[in-house]
Amino acid sequence: MASQPAAARHRQRTQEDARKTAGEKWRDSDLVFTTRNGTPVEPRNFNRAFTAHCRRAGVPVIRVHDTRHTCASLLAALDVHPRVAMRILRHSQISMTMDVYTQIPTPETRAALDRLNRSLDNPSES
């Protein structure tokens, strides 16, 4: 278990706790993400939960898949090397990462994002 990433270890502990809580209702599977009873998560329920989390966080509600595009574009804006972004997004080809998922910011966009970042860091100065 020590060789697993921290997120995987955390998920495993969470699932073990759910298994104990569910008792006889638990259904064993090889799935990483399950309901509180070990059954597969229904896509509609997942989407409803994602929407609820977005609303509670006060962020725009977007499709779950669009979070991949957002991640790719943020990595590009942070000057993360495209090959690293490709690995993070689990793409097999760099063209998928760069041509489909990533919107490279223009210098004007980058300047606007820098101003936005400064205003969020120091709201009283904007």
Image (cartoon, grey):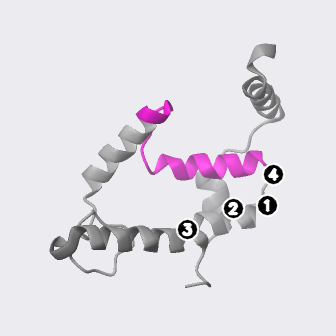
Kindly check if marks 4 and 1 are in contact, taking CB atoms under 8 A apart as contact: yes
Rendered image: mark on residue 79: 4
Question: Per the image, is 74 magenta?
Answer: yes
Mark 4 residue type: Asp
* CA distance separating discs 2 and 3: 19 Å
Q: Main secondary structure of the magenta part?
A: helix
On the image, the x and y values in percent for residue 56 come to: 43, 34
Circle 1: residue type: His
Per the model, the C-alpha gap separating discs 2 and 1 is: 6 Å
Q: In the rendering, at what x and y percent does residue 73 appear? A: 66, 47
Q: Real-space Cα distance between discs 2 and 4?
A: 10 Å
Q: In this view, does 16 lie above or below 59?
A: below
Near-viewer residue (48 or 109): 48
Magenta residues? 55-79
Label 3, secondary structure: give it.
helix
What label does residue 85 carry, if any? Answer: 2
Q: Name the residue under label 3.
A: 7
